[in-house]
Every structure is written in structure tokens, then in C-alpha cells.
């Protein structure tokens, strides 16, 4: 089995927690580091959350790096639950893990350049504001050459926004960074709200995580219950999305998804800053720059996430050994 080396760039975040645990639980993926950016909460709290997550997964060997504390240009905006700060200790136990001294931006750049020198490439799962990734791409031309693809959770098209009426939060938080990444020439795979809102997790899923997933599953179930995203008025049925985990699920089982290569852009400034557009019907001369995922097998995605994290309750991973996953 080939193993894909990935960096998770994140602003944990409940959805981010699910994505990180899913990646760690999956032997197809080698998480070589977690780079942290301010977003859902401030940078200090985001770093604490990342350290807590590698601890409950039994993977204290995965390094955590602190990155950008704010966006490139615009004023800072935090996520909906920023007032909560770090995950409460009663939900996710404290961790002795400390972030590395190297900055997240330099870490991403170093790993990408080293991979290019070995004639290899890494994958970045970008599930927070894209500030770290944009800064790394601007450090040196070799950085882009070492990145196979950037799998992004961000944007909204027909679904409209959830942070504002016109924008998804990760894009709204730093649209200038998004513009840099969209123009980088690196292969992009984009998961917008249009697809993430198609898969809703319910109490049945939470109970499955809690019963079968050991400490990671119990912690994630507690977080999902405490910060529930259910919205029957919007979704028309019970349940809430786990947006960020789709990026990892696509790496594991791309057959669960379908998408279209298209040109994507973002409004950087003005009253609709953070708005994203996609030229699905080729109404312009813009060149396609992203694979936009448009549909998901909801049942398959839910089963994948719950079963992989449940595998963490079967066998605790050691510092240098991944658990086998069962589907």
C-alpha cells in the first residue's frame, strides 16, 4: 500500500478535529505535521487544540507548528465559536505536547522544497484560512514544485455563505490569501459549502463514535454535541455537517465524490469580500484552476469517518505505528 505524505493546515475547530483524527486513523496517510493558523479561534488557542488532538490520538510524535496569527491584509475575523477558546478540558484532556519553534509557514516551505529535491511531492489539506499556505508559496519558487495538490475546504457557490450571506468563513477570513493560492498553479481540489452541506451527521453517528472510538471517539462526540451545527430550517432535515473532514475522506476514497474542473475566483476587497465564484458553464475565458467537488455519497462518507475513528478504539496507536482501519 502506498502512503501519501500530508500536512494538515488547520485552525481547530470541531470540524478540524474530525479531519485530524480521521487522517491519523488512516494508514494510507502519513501526517508529517500540523501547521496551525488563527481562524476559528485565536492562534494560541488553535495551537493548544492541535496539541490536544495529537495527544488523544496517541500520536505525540506528530509535530505541531504555530503559523500566522492574522490575515494578510484585511481586519481579523474569528469563527462563530471564538469565545469558547481552547477545547474545554472536560471534553478534550490537557496535553503535554508543545509546538515546535519553527514557524508553520517555514515548515510548509521546507517540507515542500525538500520533497521537490527528492523528486517527490506532498499534499496539503488546508481546512482553515489559507494564510499559512499563501505565505509559504510566496517564500520561494521551489515550494510549489514540491506540492502535489492542495485540498481546500472553502468557498460557497449556490449554497451561499454561512459566515456572511455571501461568503464561507475560511475564505472570508483571508480572501487575499485565497487569491494567491488560486493563482499558484498548484493542483487544487475545492470542497465548498455546496458539497459539505450535503452530508449531515446525526446523534446516531455521535453514539457510534462514543461507543467504539475509544478516547478520540468520545472526545469528538462530546465536541460535536456541544457545538452542534444542526439547522433544520436551512437543511430541511436533522443533522449537521462536518465540513473539514471531507478533504481527508476524498484522499482516502475519492470514489465517494464527483467534481468538475473549472475556473474559480474570489473577491478580495469591498463589501462582498470573500465571495467565491465558479465558471461551471464556461461563460468566461478564465482557465480552470481547481477541481470543484460537487456531490458526495453521504452514507459512504459518514460510514468512513465513523468506522475509521472507531478503529482508534480497537488499538491505541503507538508513537511510531498507525492502527489498521476497518470499514
Image (tube, rainbow, N blue to C red):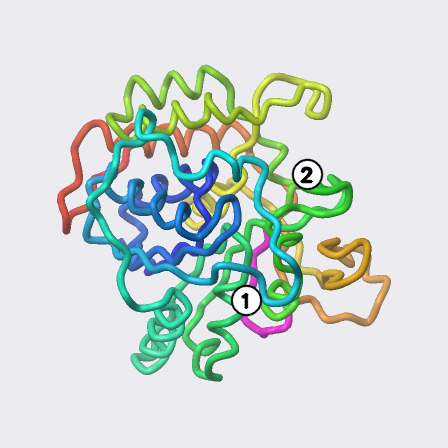
In the image, 290 versus 9, the foreground residue is 9
- Which quadrant, please, contains the C terminus? top left
Residue 272 position, x and y percent, is 80, 54
Q: Earlier in the sequence, mark 2 or mark 1?
A: 2
Q: Residues within 10 Å of mark 1 (few under 14, many from 20)?
A: some
Residue under label 2: 162
Residue 22: which quarter of the image? top left
Q: How far separated are the C-alphas under marks 2 and 1?
A: 26 Å
In the image, 89 versus 250, the foreground residue is 89
Q: Residues within 10 Å of mark 2 (few under 14, many from 20)?
A: some
Residue 27 position, x and y percent, is 27, 47
Q: Relative to 146, is 5 on the left or the right?
A: left
Q: Residue at x 34, y 45 (%)?
A: 48
Residue under label 1: 187
Residue 243 position, x and y percent, is 54, 39
In the image, 28 versus 225, the foreground residue is 225
**Highlighted magenta segment, given as a residue range:** 183-190
Residue 194 position, x and y percent, is 68, 41
Q: Can the viewer see residue 303?
A: yes
- Cβ atoms at labels 2 and 1 below 8 Å apart: no
Amino acid at each position: 500500500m502506498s502512503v501519501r505524505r500530508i500536512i494538515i493546515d488547520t485552525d481547530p475547530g470541531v470540524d478540524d478535529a474530525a479531519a485530524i483524527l480521521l487522517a491519523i486513523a488512516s494508514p494510507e496517510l502519513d501526517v508529517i505535521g500540523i501547521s496551525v493558523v488563527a481562524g476559528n479561534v485565536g492562534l494560541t488557542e488553535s495551537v493548544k487544540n492541535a496539541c490536544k488532538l495529537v495527544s488523544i490520538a496517541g500520536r505525540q510524535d506528530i509535530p505541531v507548528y504555530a503559523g500566522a496569527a492574522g490575515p494578510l491584509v484585511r481586519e481579523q475575523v474569528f469563527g462563530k465559536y471564538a469565545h469558547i477558546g481552547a477545547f474545554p478540558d472536560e471534553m478534550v484532556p490537557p496535553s503535554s505536547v508543545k509546538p515546535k519553534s519553527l514557524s508553520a509557514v517555514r515548515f510548509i516551505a521546507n517540507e515542500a522544497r525538500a520533497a521537490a529535491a527528492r523528486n517527490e511531492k506532498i499534499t496539503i489539506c488546508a481546512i482553515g484560512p489559507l494564510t499559512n499556505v499563501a505565505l509559504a508559496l510566496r517564500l520561494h519558487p521551489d515550494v510549489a514544485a514540491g506540492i502535489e495538490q492542495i485540498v481546500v475546504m472553502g468557498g460557497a457557490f449556490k449554497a451561499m455563505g454561512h459566515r456572511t450571506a455571501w461568503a464561507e468563513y475560511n475564505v472570508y477570513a483571508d480572501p487575499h490569501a485565497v487569491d494567491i493560492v488560486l493563482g499558484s498553479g498548484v493542483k487544487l481540489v475545492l470542497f465548498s459549502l455546496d458539497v459539505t452541506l450535503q452530508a449531515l451527521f446525526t446523534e446516531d453517528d455521535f453514539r457510534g463514535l462514543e461507543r467504539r472510538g475509544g478516547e478520540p471517539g468520545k472526545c469528538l462526540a462530546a465536541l460535536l454535541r456541544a457545538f452542534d451545527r444542526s439547522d433544520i430550517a436551512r437543511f430541511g432535515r436533522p443533522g449537521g455537517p462536518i465540513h473539514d473532514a471531507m478533504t481527508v475522506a476524498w484522499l482516502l476514497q475519492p470514489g465517494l465524490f464527483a467534481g468538475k474542473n473549472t475556473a474559480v475566483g474570489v473577491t478580495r476587497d469591498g463589501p462582498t469580500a470573500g465571495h467565491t465564484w465558479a465558471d461551471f458553464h464556461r461563460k468566461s475565458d478564465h482557465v480552470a484552476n481547481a477541481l470543484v467537488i460537487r456531490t458526495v455519497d453521504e452514507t459512504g462518507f459518514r460510514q468512513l469517518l465513523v468506522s475509521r475513528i472507531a478503529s482508534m478504539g480497537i488499538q491505541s496507536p503507538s508513537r511510531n505505528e498507525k492502527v489498521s482501519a476497518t470499514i
